[in-house]
Image (spheres, coloured by chain):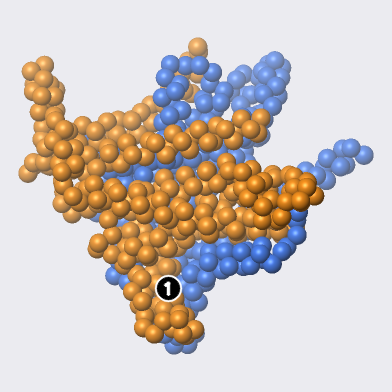
Chain colours: A blue, B orange
Amino acid sequence: MRRLTWFNATSLTLGFAFLYIPMIIVIVYSFNESRLVTVWGGFSTKWYGELLQNEAFLDAAWVTFKVGLVSSIIATILGTMGAYVLVRGGRFFGRTLFSGMIYAPLVMPEVITGLSLLLLFISIGLDRGLFTIILAHATFSMCYVSVVVSSRLVSFDRSVEEAALDLGCTPFEAFRLVTLPIIAPAVISGWLLALTLSLDDLVIASFVAGPSATTLPIKVFSSIRLGVSPEINALSTILIGIVTIGTFAASLTTKRAVMRKDRERRLAEQ
Amino acid sequence: MNIRRIALISVPYLWLLALFMVPFLIVFKISLSDIALAIPPYTPTLDISGGWTEVRSFFSQLDFENFEFLATDDLYWKSYLSSLKIAFISTFICLLVGFPIAYGMANAPKEWQPTLMLLVILPFWTSFLIRVYSLIGILSQEGMLNQFLMWIGLIGEPLTILNTNIAVYIGIVYTYCPFMILPIYATLIKLDGSLLEAAEDLGCSRTEAFWRITVPLSKAGIIAGCFLVFIPALGEFVIPSLLGGSDTLMIGKVLYEEFFANRDWPVAGAVAVILLLILIVPIVLYQRNEQKIMEAEK
């Protein structure tokens, strides 16, 4: 069954060309000397220089970074707790409502999440700014963390936890010494997902951000509306570069971890 | 039931109640209010200090006027229909584009698969906004696509693609394609190759075997992929506002403009409530499909 037919080779080539050509063009044109975005005027890195001198972009990037870091940490803690409650919590009052609230934000249109949070902040008189963006991002990304962590919690053997409890661990110690190390990869990927979602979010942030705090996507969106610009090409290239390096590094680490486990298992079997 | 367990359950529970459930109830309440020239710009506002009579008069002022308005004004039901149409057609195109890619991946040599998988996931981690942005330069009047089509002589004059519905279709297919590819790939990779061999041995042609074995057995992945594209596409805001034209009607954009440009919060609330009601059907169907996949795996 695993053979590379002409049909498969063509569909893979065309498919990946479709996925990647637009991004490659952005990267290539970020090194364009000319301000005209469709005419090649020679190689230059001057747009990167201009980007790094653009205060507005740097400020927005700093705000985005702070929001992403804080909200993803809150989301990871709350999301892991949520997953633990869902999988190990047993029965409690309103469990269906709880699991509904964990899954609903995943399919909720962003405009509705943004609108509803904004109306909440206004009705309790909370000033919009950094703090409200963090609250909003932590809320929707904790649900993604919960889903990722709970799929890991479901699949692992519960008897190890019970053994720890039998051997005199308190429930918290059992969680910290046994459960947490096992679910750690899922917690980390949940955190990365929460971080990416926060850094990426435009719609919810533009509802809940006040004039005092502009995130990078909001800034990028407002300048894209005016058309294509070489500075945005340069910024896109930097962001694509970071994601590419991050993704490859993550996949290499997982691959190494798998190989190490394989080797350990083989050694143990000898 | 000890204190620790109560704390563990109540922290995420209360967080979600306060920041997910309550906000939604507020949207529902405002959708029953009337627009007013005040801060906040709607009436009535609840004042509990006025006692029971105040609360009673508050509830008596709520009505379904905004929903009646949505039903009678062309703009809204046309936007809902046009969002449904755009989401439906682009999901279908996504399937046509995504299935061959997933099929090619599942049938590629085994040592290629992790790399191919990585190549599909990479766009998913890349900023959504930047991927939409990358299309603007290509689809514009003097963009790459027009230059290419004129170069091969297919067209004599540049086509207007950007700021039309066609650009919105291309945008949705481009950005949501990985959501279609991954679930289909996941079902195809589990497909037992000996079934296809058996079919060929029994006299099935390759194409026939594909339609009678591969497609039915990957149905769960196809359904999951379709909903993963359809549900977010329906409420999409970024793609229609960057790639679409002024005549592109999509409900996410209408809601955003109703709120920020017209400052009509009650109508925006009503638009949101109806959008959710429309979404409940595909969401429930998607959940059912997921449960079926889970049960099949057990």
Question: Which chain letter goes with mark 1?
Answer: B
Which percent across, then down, holds residue B260?
A: 20, 51
Label 1 sits on residue:
B138
Which percent across, then down, holds residue B175?
A: 46, 58
**On the picture, is B84 further left or further right than B12?**
left
Compare residues A13 and B100 and report the one nearer the observer: B100
Which percent across, then down, holds residue A140?
A: 41, 40
Compare residues B77 and B174 and report the one nearer the observer: B77
Q: Residue at x 75, y 45 (%)?
A: B195
Residue A122 in the image: above or below residue B124: above
Evaluate whether residue B189 shows in this view: yes
**On the picture, is A152 further left or further right than A92?**
right
Q: Residue at x 16, y 47 (%)?
A: B73
Furthest toward the top, the residue is B1
The kind of residue on which mark 1 rests is Ile
Residue A57 in the image: above or below residue A149: below
Evaluate whether residue A191 shows in this view: no
Residue A78 in the image: above or below residue B93: above
Which percent across, then down, holds residue A193?
A: 51, 47
**On the picture, is A258 further left or further right than B219?**
right
**On the picture, is A217 further left or further right than B106?**
left
Q: Residue at x 61, y 26 (%)?
A: A175
Q: Residue at x 40, y 60 (%)?
A: B169
- The secondary structure type at the circle numbered 1 is helix
Q: Quadrant of the C terminus of chain B?
A: top right
Residue B131 in the image: above or below residue B195: below
